């Protein structure tokens, strides 16, 4: 026969018990208010640091956010304290003997704003994180409070010290306070971290006080299931590419399985993830050498999979330096990083007191190691990393294995903080040869980021988010400098093409006028070099059709009219040439030919015409000084920087190119900002970005990651490069997504 437990109303508690409740209330309020104060301090420091790095004294959005944070601090702290006071005032009221009992009609559905949904989601995720790390002590405290009030269990929404109530305090404090959404989420994130970090001391104190007062649970409390929110607070499903996880979702060894990780993903992402795992499970037994894999070790005798804390301990031992397996995989491209790393992990189990021949890896852990190993194998093989950058990236292997073991959502969500950090580090390092001070500064920032990750990553994914935000802020500044270099490159290319266009126009005018005529050598030299240059400058500065343009055309017409025609008497050369002296000297001056050099050229022009009229051999054309030679530029498809010379050299147009219409159309559809990969002289494919499309020639200009022009080509020339295998167009995804797709492609190829 079970004992009937009746709830004890607060007014019927003994004076000593009421005093104990008041002490617990005061102690909890002081502790949690101190937590909130640290939240504001950390958020303020973070925003201030970002504002300084932004380099905009007055208009920085981070300064505006910091002002909004400081303005809202007092009302939020007041609301926070009132929420805690109300929770303790309601403690013990409306108690139910059956914890599963719910008031009829309370499960009411309602529509709420999207911002409210975000707050509910943040509250639920924080509650889950708190329960994973401090769940045993919270359950013990709830059991003692239940004993105090004479009930089987306290409803989490009534208990002010439940994980749900503690996590919801920051949301309740925002009611009626106008705070920008981004500032609010910063506060939520820092509150989650501080609450998880400092809650243990409070729980130990409160449990000790209740124990001393004799309120002990009759039996060891069973772990409470994850506290579900009310229906009107249900978290929305995660977006297809959104990572809605809390930074500290996983702790105390409670890491989700692959199936649990995929539960919140979109159907498309779940399908891709399931297909990836299925291929991996089919690939592993056939392609990993016997005696080297965890599967082989597992089959050797009675073994048990390492528990999650044991796996994390072994990984932590290897985190401080690059494991031997990673170094070997870099030096031997044919070796499998995942195979080598799994064996090294099992060998190092002895360092935490586990016999390596008696333990193995769970399938989920082995999947995580395999996927991360394959991911980095592809990065080392196919990405454009210098040796120093490869060494830096190799230090990320163990932290990313830890992150994958803790959180399988790493492979599901494009916005996962670890995934974003890898993308940012790849952006900072790929193609960066440290040739300039800005590039070296960027590499140093990437190295500092990896150093901090190695030193600070324990079992809190939050460090990835913190470091990614800091590196992203630095990259934004670097990107602004690169954009300035790109604009300069575009301006230079535009000027060059305008000059080419003007020279082509001048050459066309000359060709039309000399058709059917045979100018003397001196006249031909003057017209093809000095006059076309003069006409080109007029086209650039004043445009065709201007008065200067017409005057320059008349100089050529009048000079060519001095050539003798068959059947016509020769016109007197000297008077006509004297009349052209001033306009001809104007033409020569635009090419820097003045003084004695101009007089000599005029003299040779007159002599050549007189010799032609008399049927004599013409005198040689005058030799112009080198500085006065105006060469016509060659039309080249590739204008290469010193560090990247594309494998294409097309001179004189595209008429001889035979290319696919589909490839030409593909090149024509490229948008400004698109990254492609072109082969350099070193045989590797380097990333370049489409920075500008010429409105004059429709040619496309590509720059490297420093904003330096490396390729200018027509769509036909680009299509030819693609057909030759010297150009790759990949899907516009970040590095992680591209590499993950390559891993899937390799698995498909191996499975045949």
Image (cartoon, rainbow, N blue to C red):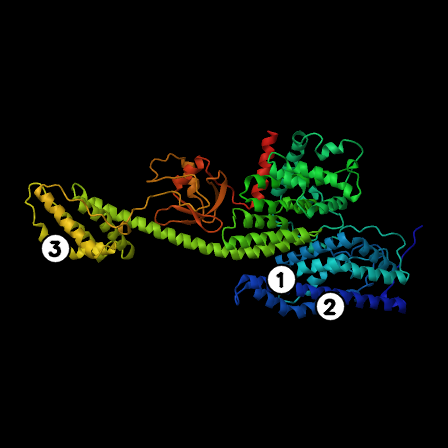
The residue mark sitting in front, 3 or 2, is: 3
Question: Marks 3/2: CA distance?
Answer: 100 Å
For the residue labelled by badge 1, is the local secondary structure a helix, a strand or a loop? helix
How far, Cα to Cα, is label 1 from label 3? Answer: 79 Å
Q: Which of the two discs, 3 and 2, labels the residue nearer the N terminus?
A: 2
Relative to 45, is 398 above or below? Answer: above
Say which element carries label 2: helix
Q: Secondary structure at mark 3?
A: helix
Of discs 2 and 1, which sits in the foreground?
Answer: 1
Does residue 34 sit above or below 621 in this rendering?
below
Q: Dot 2 surroundings within 10 Å: few (below 14), some, or many (20 or more)?
A: many
Q: How many marks?
A: 3
Residues 143 and 697: in front is 697
Q: Is residue 215 above or below residue 741?
A: below
Neighbourhood count class around disc 1 (C-alpha, 10 Å): few under 14, some 14–19, many 20 upward: some
Mark 2–mark 1 Cα distance, whole angstroms, equals: 24 Å
Image position of 224 (left or right of 583)? right
Rendered image: mark on residue 46 = 1
Pointer 2 or 1: first along the chain: 1
Q: Nearer the viewer, residue 59 or 434?
A: 434
Counting from the top left corner in percent of width and height, residue 349 is at 76, 41
Image coords of residue 209 (percent x, y) = 86, 63
Side (left or right) of 447 relative to 581: right
Q: Residue at x 35, y 53 (%)?
A: 495
> Is there any visible trace of residue 108 in the rendered image?
no
What residue does disc 3 label?
578
Mark number displayed over residue 339: none
Location of mark 2 (residue) = 81
Tell me, yes or no, if residue 110 can be seen here. Answer: yes
């Amino acid at each position: 026969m079970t004992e009937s437990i009746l709830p004890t109303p607060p007014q019927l508690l003994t004076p000593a018990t009421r005093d104990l409740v008041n002490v617990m209330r005061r102690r909890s309020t002081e502790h949690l208010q101190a937590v909130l104060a640290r939240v504001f301090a950390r958020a303020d420091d973070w925003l201030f640091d970002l504002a300084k790095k932004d380099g905009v004294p007055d208009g920085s959005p981070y300064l505006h956010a910091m002002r909004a944070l400081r303005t809202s601090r007092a009302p939020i702290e007041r609301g926070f304290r009132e929420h805690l006071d109300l929770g303790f005032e309601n403690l013990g009221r409306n108690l139910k003997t059956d914890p599963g009992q719910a008031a009829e009609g309370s499960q009411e559905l309602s529509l709420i704003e999207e911002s409210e949904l975000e707050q509910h989601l943040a509250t639920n995720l924080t509650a889950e994180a708190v329960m994973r790390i401090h769940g045993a002590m919270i359950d013990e405290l709830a059991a003692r409070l239940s004993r105090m009030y004479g009930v089987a269990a306290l409803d989490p929404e009534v208990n002010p010290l439940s994980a749900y109530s503690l996590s919801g305090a920051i949301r309740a404090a925002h009611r009626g306070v106008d705070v920008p959404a981004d500032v609010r989420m910063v506060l939520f994130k820092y509150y989650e971290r501080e609450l998880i970090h400092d809650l243990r001391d409070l729980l130990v104190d409160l449990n000790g006080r209740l124990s001393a007062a004799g309120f002990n649970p009759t039996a060891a409390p069973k772990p409470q299931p994850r506290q579900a929110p009310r229906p009107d607070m249900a978290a929305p499903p995660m977006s297809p590419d959104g990572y809605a996880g809390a930074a500290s979702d996983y702790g105390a060894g409670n890491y989700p399985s692959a199936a649990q990780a995929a539960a919140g993903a979109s159907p498309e992402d779940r399908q891709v993830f399931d297909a990836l795992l299925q291929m991996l499970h089919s690939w592993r037994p056939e392609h990993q050498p016997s005696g080297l894999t965890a599967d082989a070790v597992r089959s050797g005798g009675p073994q048990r999979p390492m528990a999650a804390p044991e796996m994390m301990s072994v990984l932590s031992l290897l985190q401080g330096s690059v494991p031997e397996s990673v170094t070997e995989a870099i030096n031997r491209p044919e070796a499998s990083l995942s195979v080598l790393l799994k064996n090294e992990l099992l060998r190092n189990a002895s360092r935490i007191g586990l016999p390596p021949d008696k333990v193995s890896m769970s399938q989920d852990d082995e999947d995580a190691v395999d996927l991360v190993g394959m991911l980095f194998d592809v990065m080392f093989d196919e990405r454009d990393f210098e040796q120093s950058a490869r060494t830096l990236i190799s230090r990320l292997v163990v932290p990313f294995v830890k992150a994958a073991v803790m959180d399988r959502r790493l492979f599901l969500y494009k916005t996962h903080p670890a995934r974003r950090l890898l993308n940012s580090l790849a952006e900072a390092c790929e193609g960066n040869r440290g040739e300039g001070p800005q590039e070296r500064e960027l590499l140093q920032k990437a190295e500092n980021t990896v150093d901090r990750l190695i030193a600070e990553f324990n079992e809190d994914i939050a460090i990835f988010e913190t470091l990614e935000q800091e590196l992203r802020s630095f990259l934004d500044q670097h990107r602004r400098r690169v954009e300035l270099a790109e604009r300069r490159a575009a301006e230079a290319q535009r000027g060059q093409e305008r000059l080419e266009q003007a020279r082509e126009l001048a050459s066309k005018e000359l060709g039309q006028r000399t058709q059917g005529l045979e100018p003397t050598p001196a006249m031909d030299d003057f017209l093809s070099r000095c006059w076309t240059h003069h006409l080109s400058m007029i086209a650039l500065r004043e445009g065709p059709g201007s008065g200067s343009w017409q005057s320059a055309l008349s100089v050529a017409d009048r000079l060519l009219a001095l050539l003798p025609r068959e059947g016509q008497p020769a016109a007197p050369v000297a008077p006509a040439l004297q009349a052209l002296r001033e306009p001809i000297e104007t033409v020569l001056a635009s090419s820097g030919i003045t003084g004695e050099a101009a007089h000599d050229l005029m003299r040779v022009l007159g002599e050549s015409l007189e010799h032609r009229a008399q049927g004599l051999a013409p005198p040689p054309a005058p030799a112009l000084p080198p500085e006065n030679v105006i060469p016509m530029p060659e039309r080249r498809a590739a204008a290469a920087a010193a560090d990247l010379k594309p494998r294409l050299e097309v001179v004189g147009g595209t008429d001889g190119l035979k290319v696919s219409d589909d490839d030409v159309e593909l090149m024509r559809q490229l948008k400004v900002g698109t990254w492609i990969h072109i082969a350099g002289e070193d045989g590797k494919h380097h990333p370049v970005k489409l920075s500008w499309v010429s409105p004059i020639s429709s040619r496309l200009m590509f720059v490297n990651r420093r904003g330096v022009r490396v390729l200018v080509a027509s769509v036909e020339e680009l299509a030819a490069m693609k057909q030759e295998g010297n150009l790759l167009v990949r899907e516009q995804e970040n590095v992680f997504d591209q590499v993950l797709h390559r891993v899937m492609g390799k698995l498909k190829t191996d499975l045949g």
